[in-house]
Image: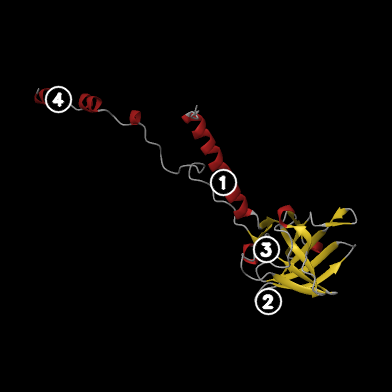
């Protein structure tokens, strides 16, 4: 016997699925912007995201190549699908090491009040019983023509600190929202029907022709 799902239940399930898709899209649209709570500056890093099919940011340090993306997984380095930073040995090993997951990304203010953002990737491959962790120090540099990965240090062990400079990582001041028309006081007098004399009252206040002839 084939059981048919009631139309109401099917409609509710469809609505729930659509809401979930909309919420995911909104999260994706807003996932690479940050407002610094210390100074109120707003950072839109969407121009730093490397789209699929294009080459990730790369840096060679101490016999390893680092593959880095901003707010998205890398496509190079042979790491797992969620790695935001991937480390690969230059010795020829094909296996990459995830130094942090783009799925576990958070923002922090740039150190010492500098103009920029710190993007933290947690949840990388295990290292001495703990997940690897990466800090991306993304500094504003208006003199550069493109985003570049310029440095890397490991301190302490399995905690990676990568330095990026970009002309697209400069904070801006968000304009204050203008008051809506509904909240603004009206400068025009309010018209009400009671303030306008009716036709009957106008007629009663005008002398009739019979009265004037007498």
Q: Nearer the viewer, residue 54 or 108?
A: 54
Secondary structure type for disc 3: loop
User: Which residue, given by chain and number where applicable, does mark 2 sit on?
Assistant: 144
Residue at the front extreme, as displayed: 1
Q: In which quarter of the image is the C terminus?
A: top left
The residues bearing labels 4 and 2 have C-alpha atoms spaced at a distance of 89 Å
- Please determine whether, in this image, residue 131 is positioned above or below residue 112: above
Q: Say whether residue 64 is left or right of residue 179.
A: right
Marking on residue 21: 1
Nearer to us: label 4 or label 1: 1
User: Which residue, given by chain and number where applicable, does mark 4 sit on?
Assistant: 208
**Which of the marked residues, 4 or 2, is nearer the chain's N terminus?**
2
Nearer to us: label 3 or label 4: 3
- Residue at figure coordinates x 80%, y 70% from the top left: 93
Marking on residue 171: 3
CB under 8 Å between callouts 2 and 1? no
**Which of the marked residues, 2 or 1, is nearer the chain's N terminus?**
1
Nearer to us: label 4 or label 2: 2
Q: On the image, which quarter does residue 159 sit in?
A: bottom right
Nearer to us: label 3 or label 2: 2
The residues bearing labels 3 and 4 have C-alpha atoms spaced at a distance of 78 Å
**Which of the marked residues, 4 or 1, is nearer the chain's N terminus?**
1
């Amino acid at each position: 016997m084939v059981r048919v799902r009631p139309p109401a239940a099917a409609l509710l399930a469809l609505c729930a699925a659509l809401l979930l898709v909309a919420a995911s899209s909104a999260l994706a649209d807003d996932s690479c912007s940050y407002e610094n709570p210390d100074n109120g500056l707003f950072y839109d890093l969407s121009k730093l995201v490397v789209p699929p099919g294009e080459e990730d940011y790369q840096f060679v340090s101490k016999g390893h190549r680092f593959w880095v993306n901003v707010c998205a997984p890398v496509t190079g380095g042979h790491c797992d699908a969620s790695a935001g930073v991937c480390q690969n040995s230059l010795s020829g090993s094909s296996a990459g090491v995830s130094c942090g997951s783009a799925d576990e990304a958070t923002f922090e203010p740039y150190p010492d009040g500098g103009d920029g953002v710190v993007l933290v990737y947690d949840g990388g491959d295990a290292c001495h019983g703990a997940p690897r962790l990466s800090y991306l120090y993304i500094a504003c540099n208006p003199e550069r023509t493109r985003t570049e990965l310029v440095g890397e240090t490991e301190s302490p062990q399995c905690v990676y600190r990568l330095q990026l400079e970009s002309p697209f990582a400069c904070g801006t001041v968000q304009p204050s929202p203008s008051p809506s028309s509904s909240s603004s006081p009206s400068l025009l007098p309010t018209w009400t029907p009671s303030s306008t004399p009716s036709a009957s009252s106008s007629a009663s206040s005008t002398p009739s022709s019979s009265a004037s002839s007498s």
